[in-house]
Image (spheres, rainbow, N blue to C red):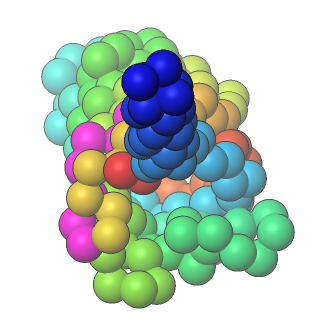
Amino acid sequence: MKSIWVLGLSLVLVLLIISSSEVLSQQSKEISEQVTTTWQMIPKILPLGEGRNFITSEGYGIVIGEEGKGIFHEATARVSSAYLMEKGVSKNYIGYISYSLKNGDKVFTTFTAEIKAGSPSKGKATIIGGTGACAGIQGSWEYSGNPLRPAAEGILQSYNKFTIKYSLP
């Protein structure tokens, strides 16, 4: 009788260990990708008085992974943003980016930023959703935007270097 109890208890412990390891292996692991994104944006400026403008912009970008791999490597991006600029300083800068990954999935983010005319911008992006294998993706990152001399009049160009931190379900 005692050996049956020991055998039964051992079986229960083995099952608990197996199910615990399955749960741990199913938990998502945070992934980091170091990337550079280049942007071309077209601003529309609505003058609101001396030294004050409301600016909206749409743009396009490409993401290159520093290691030449990762889900964001060679993704294209489309951005829409809006902000109030007072005396060269942004107020309430917010935007949305849709990343189109090489496999056809999409990742959606929102971002906020602080801009001073002629200086690098600083901001934070948060992943708000995804499609396909990226459904349920979560993550965020901080970035600095570096303005570049535009290749043509009427556009803004910049690049960002940052580390995307995310987890997949």
**Which x, y percent locates residue 138?**
38, 41
**Please, which residue is most extreme toward the right here?**
67
* Residue sitting nearer the eye, 146 or 86: 146
**Which x, y percent locates residue 15?**
43, 40
Say how many tags the image has.
Answer: 0
Q: Residue at x 33, y 62 (%)?
A: 134
**Residue 101 falls inside the magenta stretch:** no
User: Is any part of residue 2 visible from this angle?
Assistant: yes
* Residue sitting nearer the eye, 162 or 160: 162
Left or right, 165 with respect to 104, comes to right
Query: The magenta stretch spans which residues?
Result: 123-132
**Which x, y percent locates residue 35?**
69, 57
* Residue sitting nearer the eye, 96 or 31: 31
Give the quarter of the image for residue 104: bottom left
**Which x, y percent locates residue 163?**
68, 44
Give the quarter of the image for residue 100: bottom left
Give the quarter of the image for residue 92: top left
**Please, which residue is most extreme toward the bottom here?**
103
Q: Residue at x 50, y 44 (%)?
A: 18
Q: Is residue 132 above or below residue 86?
A: below
Q: Is residue 85 above or below residue 77?
A: above
User: Is any part of residue 146 visible from this angle?
Assistant: no
Query: Dividing the image into 4 quarters, which one contains the N terminus?
Result: top left
Query: Would you say the magenta stretch is mainly helix, strand or loop?
Result: strand
Q: Residue at x 70, y 75 (%)?
A: 69
* Residue sitting nearer the eye, 165 or 65: 165
Left or right, 87 with respect to 152, comes to left
